[in-house]
Image (cartoon, helix red, strand yellow):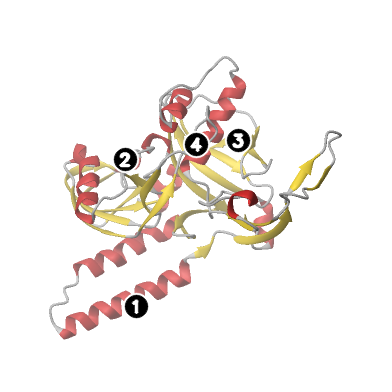
Amino acid sequence: MSGETFSLRFRILEPMMFRRAGEFDPSSRGIYSSARSFSLPTPSTIAGAVATLILEQNPGLMPGGESWEEEIKSVLGNAELRGPYLLKSGDFQVAYGERGLRLGELPGLAVGYWRLAQTEAKTYSEAKEWVLLHRELIKELERKAQALGKLQERVGVGLLKRAEGVKVADEKRGLLYAASYVDYVLSAADTEGVEICVDARNLQLEDSFYAVKLGGEGRVTALRKGSAVLTTIKSVVWRGREKAEGSVALYLASPALFKCGLTREKLLEVIAEKLSTYSARVLGIVGSTALLGAGFSLSKGRRKPVYLALEPGSIIFVDLPDPRPLEQLYWSSLSEAGGQLGYGTAIPIPLTMQ
């Protein structure tokens, strides 16, 4: 029902292809081409899959709007998505670059980087202390960060479909291609079930199981509704706290999209504007940026603009002058584009005691 908060849980049944930028058609790149998967789907991939399901259930509904984002929102209505997360062996993992961290490890990571930011390095001894702290943090991250999945390489040849339905090698354009799928089964424990989870609210979806296309090349997942990942965040990250004041770390769980060409200073200004509702002051960012093609046009069937993306695993440190509900911060996106669909999902982590 409207207003309900739950998670969309996509049960993974086989290796998946969440395609990175690049051409997959051999004819477009010469004698050889390849496709490589992200470790987790982008928010627009999930939102597009949900929108497609809704369109299948409502044949008379037509997506509208000029941009890919407006098209999907015209189908989802006021629904908001947050994530994605990976559920394996009973633990929720969040993206840290191309690897993953358990939700319960986020407070320690945030505090570690906060200590680095607070450590002055004006003298040799202070600089030495900073380097030691940084090395300790990197070692800790290397120990805790886990591979979300392993890449499974496959090589094929372009095929031609004859009228009788039989596929044979295309003599003119049947060139080699390689595909790297992400396989989430890393151990025997993972065979019990792996799910990609996205928190949702204000989304009208019946309690049922759905077969949903996701993961490329005709792959299908089993979609069901489950308890919100937010419930686990409240327990293992916020540890019962409902509000935060003072220094807070915002851990970026999904890419935040911005217009290309922004300088570091302008990026800080845009993020500060996104947080203006809370009168938050941005203290700094630890993270990296990359170019990311995001969004898919439901009507035109093609990808949309390229954005500057602040990558998952980045941390934004802010100062809140007044106590603010942590759940409200969680549902506030940091992304210029696609915020309602899950881009710019930030998990707030209090750094000061109440």
Q: Which residue is mark 3?
A: 224
Residue that appears at 38% across and 58% down: 106
Judge by depth and name the residue closer to the eye, 155 or 77. Answer: 155
Q: Residues within 10 Å of mark 1 (few under 14, many from 20)?
A: few
> Residue 336 got which mark?
2
Q: Earlier in the sequence, mark 4 or mark 3?
A: 3
Q: Which residue is mark 1?
A: 135
Q: CA distance from mark 4 to mark 2?
A: 17 Å
Q: Is residue 164 left or right of residue 133?
A: right
> Residue 296 got which mark?
4
Give the percent coordinates (x, y) of residue 311.
Answer: 39, 54
Q: Earlier in the sequence, mark 3 or mark 1?
A: 1
Is the residue 51 above or below the residue 169 in the image? above
- Label 4 is placed on what type of residue? Phe
Q: Is residue 123 left or right of residue 231?
A: left
Q: Earlier in the sequence, mark 3 or mark 2?
A: 3
Q: Label 3: state its secondary structure.
A: strand
Give the percent coordinates (x, y) of residue 234.
Answer: 39, 46
Q: Are marks 3 and 2 in contact (CB under 8 Å)?
A: no
Which image quadrant is residue 111 in? Answer: bottom left
- Label 2 is placed on what type of residue? Glu
Residue 72 in view of the camera: yes
**Viewer-nearest of labels 4 and 3?**
4
**Viewer-nearest of labels 2 and 1?**
2
Q: Label 4: state its secondary structure.
A: loop
Q: CA distance from mark 4 to mark 3?
A: 23 Å
- Label 3 is placed on what type of residue? Arg
